[in-house]
Image (spheres, rainbow, N blue to C red):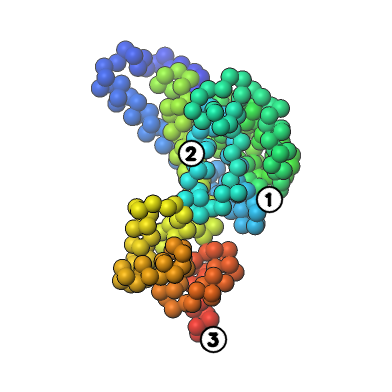
Amino acid sequence: MGTEDKDESRPFIDAMSRKKARQFVLAEHVRAARAVQCAAPAIDSAVEEMIARLEVAGSRIFYVGAGTSGRQAVADGAELLPTFGWPEDRVVYCVAGFPASLWQSIEGAEDNVNAAQKLMSLYKVSAHDVVIAVAASGTTPFTWECLREAKSRGALTIGISNNDYISPLLAEAECPIFLDTGPEPIVGSTRMKAGTAQRIALNTLSTLVMVGLGHVYLGEMVNVRAKCAKIDTRRVNMVMRLTDCSEEKARDSLSESGGDVRIAIMLVKGCDLQSAQVFLALTGGTLGSALTLHELDQSTG
């Protein structure tokens, strides 16, 4: 059964007690997580394909969707810069009715295929890019047209849908990901189970891709870019944990590095500022590889 179907075999949520309704909704969200687990092979395949494309300098991640699905996509992409240091100009949002559609419904936006075609042309989508298109129904015209046009331009296309038997999105995508969440607790309200499954799937995809691209070191977000007191403290703690240095040494190295955790760690490990910058540039900003170059340099110096 799909997201628009009604499951007549179970009680209606508005006929339940508050407690029963809460138990029902939470159980359905657990089912959403299981649906993502069942899609693991498709997710694994998509991750490998994404990493291969995104290793190319200048390649971009496009998040495509409409309505709830579009908002889920934007929420995932918005975290890439502060968490992983992914360049802002390498994330593009193609959401029907954007940006107003992030907080309100824009009538007719999801049916506008001309807007989809114009966006793909405007952003000059190419074979270096990755397009993640999300639609619970799998039939949203705007989303499907973005994916179709991107595919024709050579981009890697990933389709995420909660319906497979009527989904042109999954049929067209090179990497289809079917999240079998079934009927919603409130019929057709895909902000519920379908949205939960989409959020988990997107989070899993982006996390594994960023790890694969070297933006995480020993379980730490060493490329973190967010600026606030909490993150400043986190930076200090990361440098201390990863180098076993004092708080004073961590703060001094972060000050010298301009707040870059990767460079700060290399400074603590005996690398000078210029060399640290060069090693990171040579390794695409990957701390583990940059440290290896530093160790080789020391051993041959």
Position in image of residue 207 (x %, y %) = 48, 49
Marks 1 and 2, how far apart at CA: 23 Å
| Residue occupied by mark 1 | 128
Give me the disc on residue 300. Answer: 3
Give me the disc on residue 75. Answer: 2
Position in image of residue 291 (x %, y %) = 49, 72
What crowding class fits label 3: few (fewer than 14 Cα within 10 Å), some (14-19), or many (20 or more)?
A: few
What crowding class fits label 2: few (fewer than 14 Cα within 10 Å), some (14-19), or many (20 or more)?
A: some
Residue at horizontal 39 percent and vertical 16 percent from the top = 9
Asked if the residues shown at circle 1 and circle 2 are in contact, with their CB atoms under 8 angstroms apart, the answer is: no
Residue 58 visible in the current orientation: yes
Q: In the picture, residue 113 is in which quadrant?
A: top right
What crowding class fits label 1: few (fewer than 14 Cα within 10 Å), some (14-19), or many (20 or more)?
A: many
Q: Nearer the viewer, residue 12 or 241?
A: 241
Looking at the image, tell me whether mark 3 or mark 1 is earlier in sequence order: 1
Q: Measured along the vertical axis of the image, is residue 233 above or below residue 19?
A: below
User: Element under label 3?
Assistant: helix
Q: Is residue 135 left or right of residue 253?
A: right
User: Element under label 2?
Assistant: helix
Q: Nearer the viewer, mark 1 or mark 2?
A: 2
Amino acid type shown at disc 1: His
Position in image of residue 144 (x %, y %) = 65, 30
Position in image of residue 273 (x %, y %) = 50, 74
Residue at horizontal 42 percent and vertical 14 percent from the top = 8
Q: In the picture, residue 172 is in which quadrant?
A: top right
Q: Nearer the viewer, residue 290 or 165?
A: 290
Residue at horizontal 34 percent and vertical 66 percent from the top = 241
Marks 3 and 1, how far apart at CA: 37 Å
Q: Nearer the viewer, residue 247 or 23?
A: 247
Residue 136 visible in the current orientation: no
